[in-house]
Amino acid sequence: MALMLFGFLALYTWNARTGYLDSLAEESGLELTGYLLRPGAWAADTVRGIWNHYFALVDVAEENAYLRQELRQAEEYLATAREEQAELIRLRALFGVSAPEGWVRMGSRVLAGRFGPNAAIESILIDRGYASGAPPGAPVLTHKGLAGKVYRASSHSATVQLLTDTSYRVAVLTQTGRVPGVLSGSGPRALLELRYVPRNVPLTAGEILVTSGMDGGHPKGIPVAVIVAVSQENEGLFQSVQAEPLTSLEELEEVAVLTPSPVRYATQPLTPFPAPAESPLPSADEKPAPENAPYADGNVAALAGAPTGQAGRTASAQNRTLPLSPR
């Protein structure tokens, strides 16, 4: 016992001088405590990671799905807005063109292109018919110029024959030189042909062709095409002139239909006929003599002794000079 007490005092004295045992005990305790707490911290970190990476991601996934839906709606809205903006630009350009005098302009949408029974001609289908302002023969145009005319119409839809159709004809003038001619279609995606232009008339490429109004079906002054080629290589009496439509006929979406404006008569009061001059009427006891009566107006005494032929001649002369009694 005394030996143990001596050893303890010696160790305490040595530790008090060096502090070695305190440091060793502190380090050993901390290390042991670290080993004991590390599994618990790992378990806590693992549970927290599972929560953050799995359970909490449910909300993140829902938020992500919501944001994706919002993005799709925004993209659809943006696409619709762009389409409406493009349509607005086209409509502003289309209705910026004023109708010629004596004509009424009506807008129409293109429903379909060339199809059905009318596929034999270059045509489009519009949503107006003879009951809604698009009778057969009505000119159809865009903001750039003439596109065609109504070929066949029902009550609320119509087929429009395009400029490029081979049977289409329109009387035109050159805008600068005022040279007349007839513009004819040559088929799909082909240039138009300007016919009946004499060889001695100067024409230049780039000149605009407008309607002359001489064919009776198109108002005057509508732009139609631009001259792209002029040739005099043929041996005929006329030049060979090719033109390109001003309107892109393959990209039509909205068009304008021209119809003659209705004639309005001014409502004026009817002017009565002037009253006839008053003339004396015979009394009830007096009977008017017939117009061819030879003895009218008391001329019996004058004609009593006359011969028959003389009486007749005298009566005829008397009828020519005496006024007729009112009937």
Image (tube, rainbow, N blue to C red):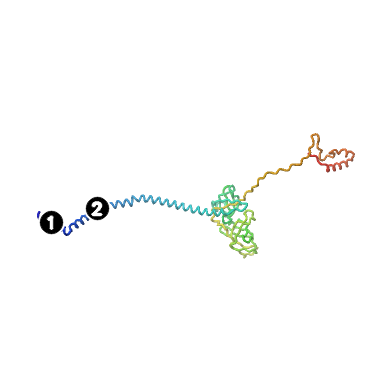
**Label 2 element class:** helix
Tell me the crowding category of disc 2: few under 14, some 14 to 19, or many 20 or more residues within 10 angstroms, Cα based: few
Report the residue that reaches farthest toward the left: 2
Report the residue that reaches farthest toward the top: 285
Q: Is residue 256 left or right of residue 295?
A: left
Q: Within the image, what quadrant is residue 193 found in?
A: bottom right
Please state which of the two labelled residues, at mark 2 or mark 1, is closer to the viewer.
1
Which is more toward the observer, 185 or 305? 305
Amino acid type of the residue that numbered disc 2 sits on in the rendered structure = Leu
**Which percent across, then down, holds residue 165?**
58, 56
Which is more toward the observer, 155 or 267? 267
Disc 1 target residue: 9
**Marks 2 and 1: CB-CB under 8 Å?**
no
Task: Give the numbered dot on residue 273.
Answer: none
Amino acid type of the residue that numbered disc 1 sits on in the rendered structure = Leu
Q: Residue at position x 13%, y 56% from top?
A: 9
**Which percent across, then down, holds residue 41?**
27, 53
**Quarter that holds the N terminus:** bottom left
Task: Give the numbered dot on residue 37.
Answer: 2
Q: Within the image, what quadrant is residue 10 found in?
A: bottom left
Tell me the crowding category of disc 1: few under 14, some 14 to 19, or many 20 or more residues within 10 angstroms, Cα based: few
**Which percent across, then down, holds residue 118?**
57, 52
**Quarter that holds the C terminus:** top right
Q: How many labels, in total? A: 2
**Label 1 element class:** helix
